[in-house]
Image: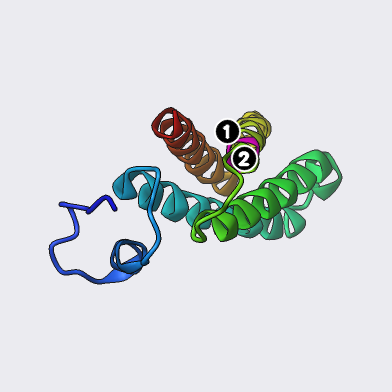
Amino acid sequence: MTTDPTDPTGTGLTAVLRSHPGEHDVDLTVLTDAVEALTECAAACRACADACLDEEMVAELVACIRTDLTCADVCATTAAVLVRRPTDPSLVRSLVEACAAACGACATECERHAGMHEHCRACAETCRRCERACRDLLAALG
């Protein structure tokens, strides 16, 4: 079992994962960073979609809203699976790859509107951070 030297308090997600009696096949710091990025991204995407619905030119933001909602769902599902100790590493890898792709697509779409909508700019940045966290996790998974 891998320990997390950056969590000296023994609290939070890392502590829960560290205390799991099963073996972990990935560095818990990388895993925790990914789960936190996924959770933040899901919330940011949902908030961005909601903000888009309040914009005057909402019809121009339909693709952004749909991309936000898809990214939020993929991130939330991936985070939910990652906090378990899954028995199928290929499934985990596939989910994380799909999540990186969803985050990249959402960031690209939000960047199209970032000059006019602050919520899209902030969401794009959050999606790019999450995409990087997914790539880091993929590298750690080997």
User: Disc 1 or 2, which lies upstream in sequence?
Assistant: 2
> Looking at the image, is 119 positioned above or below residue 103?
below
Circle 2 sits on which residue? Answer: 99
> In the displayed image of the protein, which residue is found farthest to the right?
59
Characterize the magenta stretch by its predominant secondary structure.
Answer: helix
Q: Residue at x 44, y 37 (%)?
A: 137
Give the residue type at disc 1.
Gly
Give the residue type at disc 2.
Cys
Circle 1 sits on which residue? Answer: 115
Given residues 99 and 95, the one toward you in this image is: 95
The image position of residue 63, as x and y in percent, is 81, 39
Occupied quadrant, residue 7: bottom left
The kind of secondary structure element at disc 2 is helix
Residue 142 included in the magenta stretch of the image: no
The image position of residue 15, as x and y in percent, is 28, 67
Q: CA distance from mark 1 to mark 2?
A: 25 Å
> Looking at the image, is 109 positioned above or below residue 78?
above
Q: Residue at x 68, y 32 (%)?
A: 109
The image position of residue 100, as x and y in percent, is 58, 34
Question: Left or right of 66: which side holds 72?
Answer: left
Magenta range is: 92-96
**Are the two marked residues, 1 and 2, in contact with CB atoms closer than 8 angstroms?**
no
Instruction: Using a 10 Å C-alpha cutoff, classify the residue at mark 1 as few (fewer than 14 neighbours), some (14 to 19) or many (20 or more).
Output: few
Given residues 24 and 130, the one toward you in this image is: 24
Occupied quadrant, residue 47: bottom right
Question: Left or right of 114: which side holds 102?
Answer: right
The kind of secondary structure element at disc 1 is loop
Occupied quadrant, residue 80: bottom right
Q: Residue at x 38, y 51 (%)?
A: 24
